Image (cartoon, helix red, strand yellow):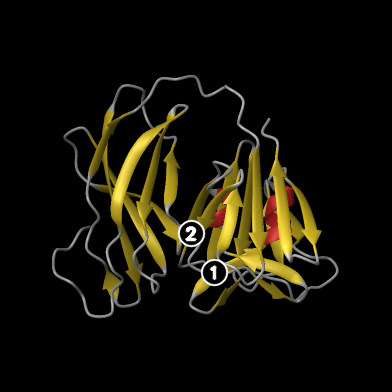
Amino acid sequence: MSSSTPIPGAPLAPTNLVASAYQKAIALSWKDNSDNEDCFYLSRKEANGTWKNLQSLIAGTQSYNDWDVVPGMTYSYQVQASNHSGLSAASNIVTYVAPSESSTQPKQAKQLKFYVDSNNYYINDVLTTMEVTPVIYHSRTMLPIAYIADPLGAKTTWDPDAGKVTVILDNKTIEMWLGSNTARINNVVVSIDTNDLAVTPMVLPPGRTMVPLSFIAQNLGCTVNWNADTREVLINYYGK
C-alpha cells in the first residue's frame, strides 16, 4: 500500500509510529502531521507474511489497539494518511510481539476535561493538545471522536464510503453516520438527540468529522458535566 513518491495534494506522512503492550492487545500510536486527511489506513503483516490493510480510521486518529492478535506472534505495522488526492508516504514500520497478559484485569478510571474553543484538554490532569477545538453547535458540544475514544481504550473505525463511524468499548458498539440524527447501539436504532433532530455527526472546518460529545460519552458509560462559567466539559469514566 505504501508509496515512496509524494502525490500532489496528498496528506503528509504520519511519523513516530510506536507499539506497546495493552493487556492482550498491541497498542499503536503515531504523530499526525497533516491537516487535510480524510482517513488513515493502518496496515499489518504477520511475521514474514504480506502487508494487508487492517483498518481505516477517521481523520485525526493518532492511536489504535489491535486486539486481533495471537500471543507470542510477531506483527509489523505501518500507517498512511489518505484524502481525495491520494495516499501519503508510509510511516516508519514498527514490529512487536503480541503480549500474553490477561485481558480481564480492570480498566483504569479516566477523567477528561475539554474546553469549548480551546485545543487544550486534560487526561487525568495531564495537559494535552488537539489539532482542532471543541465547538458548540445547536447547543451541543462537538469534537472529533478520537479524543474521547482513544483515552478510554475504545476502538474507533471509519468507513469513508458509508460515512460511518464505529466505536467499540467492552460490550458496547456505537455506529453513527454523517448527517444522520439516529445511531445504532448494539444494533438498536436510537435518536442522537431527542430534543433537537438537527444534531448529527458532521464535517466542520478544517475538514474534521465532529460528533456530539455527550452522546458518545454517556453511551460509553461515562458521566458528563458542563460548567457554563468555564465552558468546561468534565467526563468521568470509572472502568468496569
Residue 235 horizontal/vertical position (percent) = 71, 50
| Residues at marks 2 and 1, CA–CA distance in whole angstroms | 10 Å
Secondary structure beneath label 1: strand
Identified at 86% across, 69% down, the residue is 195
Q: Which residue is mark 1?
A: 209
Asked if 214 appears above or below 231 in the picture, the reply is: above
Residue 222 horizontal/vertical position (percent) = 72, 45
Q: Toward which corner of the image does residue 144 lie, by quadrant?
A: bottom right
Give the mark toward the camera: 2 or 1: 1
Q: Residue 55 or 161: which is nearer the viewer? A: 55
Outermost residue on the left side: it is: 5
Point out the image quarter for the N terminus. Answer: bottom left
Residue 116 horizontal/vertical position (percent) = 67, 68
Residue 79 seen in the current view:
no
Identified at 67% across, 49% down, the residue is 187
The reply to whether callout 2 and callout 1 are in contact (CB within 8 Å) is yes
Which amino acid type is marked by label 2? Trp
Left-right relation of 8 to 180: left
Point out the image quarter for the C terminus. Answer: top right
Identified at 44% across, 41% down, the residue is 65
Which amino acid type is marked by label 1? Thr
Residue 48 horizontal/vertical position (percent) = 16, 34
Residue 63 seen in the current view:
yes
Q: Which residue is mark 2?
A: 158
Residue 101, labelled with which disc?
A: none
